Amino acid sequence: MYPMSKKGHTLEHMRESAHLRPRSGLHAAAMRVRHAMAYATHKFFHDNGFLYIHTPIITCADCEGAGEQFGITTLLGADHHKPGVEIPLYGPQEEKKLSKKEMKRRAKLEAQGKAVEEEGETIVEGAVDYTKDFFGKRANLTVSGQLNVETHACALSDVYTFGPTFRAENSHTGRHLSEFWMIEPEIAFADLEDDINLAEDYLKYCVRYALEMCGEDLEFFENSPYGEKGLRERLKNVIESPFKRLTYTEAIKLLEKAYEDGVEFEVKPEWGIDLPSEHERYLCEKVFCKPVVLTNYPKDIKAFYMKLDDDGKTVSAADILVPKIGEIIGGSQREHRTDVLVKRCKEMGLDPKAIWWYVDLRKYGTVPHAGFGLGFERLILFVTGLDNIRDVIPFPRWAGNAEF
């Protein structure tokens, strides 16, 4: 039987026939909007003097430090039916004889009361020996092109990357995918305020472009049972007024007051937490009724590369929250002080030697710079009014599903 009859089908059913769902009106409309947003993205950055830089998909660095990466290996062999595949492991390690130079280095550090760091990569007996792998070390699919694109921002000024990224997060929500696209601009000679201004201008440009060029499809989504009533009015509200800006600390106080007044949250708001979607949406849907920019987050819930504020507790970070979605953009001013960057890496459990080239950008001279990342599929969700992120990408990937 033909899997797509004339009767209505659920979006879940349509995902099971991803090779045929482009023939449905809703998916076709979503793909037209997706194309328009990709074109608008390139046009916005091109018209504003940015260079498009292609960053690698295969990387040995973890930009976010979260460890939720897909590993790449050829150690399993080409024949996936072959039994008894042996993975090379590290055996017992002989104790290295220290050179006179190394002995002097350690003695000097001990005299200064500093910790002695081992040189070279730490080898653990029984761990996988990736020196026998294709790249000679552990390699992964990238979670972000930001670290790579920063290398070009420090030389060519304003740049951006727009490409696929991957995250091995075992999440089944309507807001997460394992394979998604990221837009990541980086601007030189810029601080956090410059970064926020760019992000707001870009988001408004995309919304305005959608209203002007995708009118019929937006009307279709408004009338669809899977769409959103009043979609175009919501989008017009985005471009007609400035985004509300406040600090993370100020937002927490508002949320704590709401919680005390009887607003029900699954997670109790308190300073130091990574705000869940329910808090983000409450701020932009109930309190301010428009997009909100939160700044200066606690350092412990943000990435190592974000500039440490003078108070030593927060970082110069900014998230843009929008109705229906929550966080749609996350950005920051980057830490340009070498000593502070190295210290932050260690605090976050990241070996600075693993990203020596990124640290070198500061060692050999740098400039204040900033940037942000926008999940492209979340932008499409925001513009179309659809509820599930799996319905705005041609072939969605999530935990347990990599069909087609």
Image: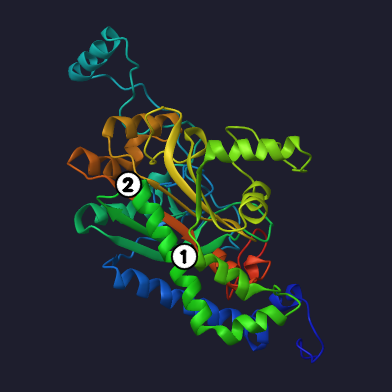
- Residue at the image position 54 percent from the left and 63 percent from the top: 179
> In the rendered view, does 397 fall on the left or right side of 142?
right
> Disc 2 designates what residue?
191
Which quadrant of the figure contains the N terminus? bottom right
Q: Secondary structure at mark 2?
A: loop
Of the residues shown, which amino acid type is indicated by label 1? Leu
- Examine the image and state in which quarter residue 364 appears: top left
Q: Position of residue 247 (x, y in %)?
A: 50, 41
144 with respect to 382 (left or right) = left
Marker disc for residue 203: 1
Kind of element beneath mark 1: helix
Mark 1 vs 2, N-terminal side: 2
**From where the camera sits, is residue 134 visible?**
no
What's the distance in space between the residues labelled 1 and 2, CA to CA? 19 Å
189 to the left or right of 272? left
Say which residue appears at 67% left-offset and 35% top-offset: 256
Q: Residues within 10 Å of mark 1 (few under 14, many from 20)?
A: many
Q: Amino acid at mark 2?
A: Asp
* Residue at far top of view: 111
Relative placement, left or right, of 398 versus 110 is: right
